[in-house]
Image: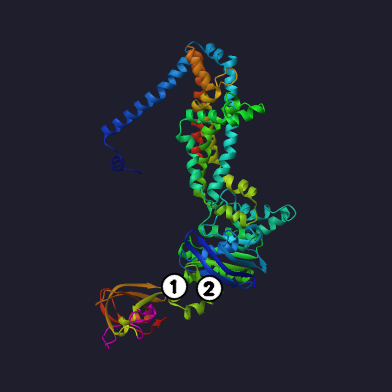
Amino acid sequence: MVSEYKISALKEPGYIRLTLIITAVLFLTIFLVMPLVVIFNEAFGKGISNFFNSISDPETITAIKLTVFTTVISILLNLVFGLSAAWAITKFDFRGKNFILTLLDLPLTISPVISGMVFVLLLGSNSFLGSLLNQFGIKVIFAVPGIILATTFVTLPYIVRELIPQMQEQGREEEEVALSLGANGWQIFLKVTLPNIKWGLLYGLILCNARAMGEFGAVSVVSGHIRGYTNTMTLHIEILYNEYNFTGAFAVSTLLTLLALITLLLKTIITKKF
Amino acid sequence: MSIKIENITKRFGNYNALRGINLEIKEGELLTLLGPSGCGKTTLLRIIAGLEIPDSGKVILFDEDMTSKGVRDRNIGFVFQHFALFKNMTVYKNIAFGLKVKPKRLRPSKSEIDEIIKSKLELVQLKWAAKRYPSQLSGGEKQRVALARALAINPKVLLLDEPFGSLDAKVRRELRKWIRHLHRGLGITSIFVTHDQEEALEVSDRVAVMNKGKIEQIGMPIEVYEKPVNSFVYNFLGNVNQFSFEELNGTSSLKDQDNVVTEYVRSHDVKIIKEKKDENVIPAEITRIYKYGASVKIELREIDSEKFIDADISQEDYDELKINEGDTIFYYIKSSKIF
């Protein structure tokens, strides 16, 4: 039983509570709710058939396909990379560990546009590597491989950064016990380490997925905006918008927004499981 | 000789964790590595296990040089202070782990595994807990599961790293007795790491007292307790008061004036009297009295020097003296030791 007295002792005075609530609600409305309403309103404003026409446009469909393809590949790459990097950093001691940790944050700290530029300079047709690859008929910049590369680079920290603190907290004792019981590296990873980090890993994957689908800056630089070929959803939205096709732009935006909402929902579910 | 350690050294950066350790452990023996934290005892244990690589020296297990071999090849059972149970597995699966990860040609059949696990569960008295998860067990139960898991692979050597370090005092004492009996029954060569002197004296066949990366003394518990080779061992194995030679004898050191000679006095060698019997007694105030075990512990403060002294007296003496906290009494020293 909680007495009246205790409840009032735990509460702030009424005017403070009211001010705080109003501030929070206003902030959320202006920055989150209103933009969402605008997006859905613009997309569906001219009727549901218009919306479906917009998203079934062949160029839109290729853009969606390209985004999904890019996202899947970069998530897979980051999954392998993220797991191995986190495993190496948290379960072993070696020189240069802090340097690697700093390096992992690089994609978060530099502007995506610059990341894109770096790849253009490194692999573009004027560069040494780019011309070398060209001789083998491989085109990276202004082509799908470049988009994947740029997306992977930008989303690189998400999985690793999610895993490292969790794995550090868990320490190495379980792995060491498994080792003393005769398990090999692969068995230890599958049976001991992975079950302990599965929720963190899934959380990292979701964040990585959202970021990969929404990436604009880096992809914009390396893609070359070739319609129906190297246009991702975000780039396609920009083109539609610049052509005053607002319904089209916002229709594609709804798809990305829905993805964001689903991500949030999954994130909430997983955070509860942690 | 089942375990032979030859001249092991280990550095962590600028820190000398181990400085030339030589140690031999007989088959079936339970040896304790005893020392304060940071003395290198855990590092030595981890080197024997193969979890740490020494900078120099050799680890020989059953006449085979294992120094360059990995943990997996050493056939050791390792028990950690914080249990390190696999959280996502039941007690049964935890114990089965070491058997199930064996390569196919060496792996026992399902029914054999089941039998081994049942016998181990019985050994640690946890038959009822087979289907529980580690989070549903108490600390003492968890550590018994960890022990069963280590024993399931039938190791040649059992290494225990402060196994009772994170348990409460009562459970510790129970498990101490229990592991002593278990060891007698199994006869498995074991090394036990602890910083608790009482624990070391109770469970071991022999004790190796370590300090600053070196072994100070090895011997049977009674030997190291009664015939400590130096002041560190004496100090570490029981309550002790330190006096400078001058304090006790009124003159400075016998031989050279520069060296301050320290005399060590066990707390049970401090005697308390109410009347001043001669010039050798020192006046002091009683600052604290409490009972522990068979003796009464008394904390004294010298009237002249503010120095604190611990005294242990028997219950009978205490009843006879009729002293209270705050009383002024006299004390003298029955015997002391100089190294």
SS assignment at label 2: strand
Chain hosting mark 1: B
**Residue B135: x percent and y percent?**
53, 51
Looking at the picture, does residue A77 appear above or below residue A241?
below
Q: Are marks 2 and 1 in contact (CB under 8 Å)?
A: no
In the figure, residue A18 lies in which quadrant?
top left
Chain hosting mark 2: B
Q: Is residue B223 visible?
A: yes
In the rendered structure, which disc, 2 or 1, sits on the residue that comes first in sequence? 2
**Residue at the spot x=60%, y=65% of the render?**
B158
Q: Is residue B270 magenta?
A: yes
Looking at the picture, does residue A148 appear above or below residue A194?
above
Quarter of the figure that contains the C terminus of chain B: bottom left
> Residue B236: which numbered mark, if any?
1
Relative to B229, is A26 on the left or the right? left
The amino acid on which the numbered mark 2 sits, given as a three-letter code, is: Val
SS assignment at label 1: helix
**Residue at the spot x=55%, y=72% of the render?**
B204
Structural distance between the alpha carbons of marks 2 and 1: 13 Å
**Residue B16: x percent and y percent?**
49, 64
Q: Is residue A203 visible?
A: no
Relative to B106, is A63 on the left or the right? left
Q: As drawn, which residue projects farthest toward the right?
A: B105
**Residue at the spot x=54%, y=44% of the render?**
A86
B315 or A98, which is in the foreground? A98
Q: Is residue B69 magenta?
A: no
**Residue A245: x percent and y percent?**
49, 12
In the figure, residue B146 lies in which quadrant?
bottom right
**Residue B117: x percent and y percent?**
66, 57
Highlighted range, magenta: B254-280
The amino acid on which the numbered mark 1 sits, given as a three-letter code, is: Phe
> Which residue is the site of mark 2?
B207
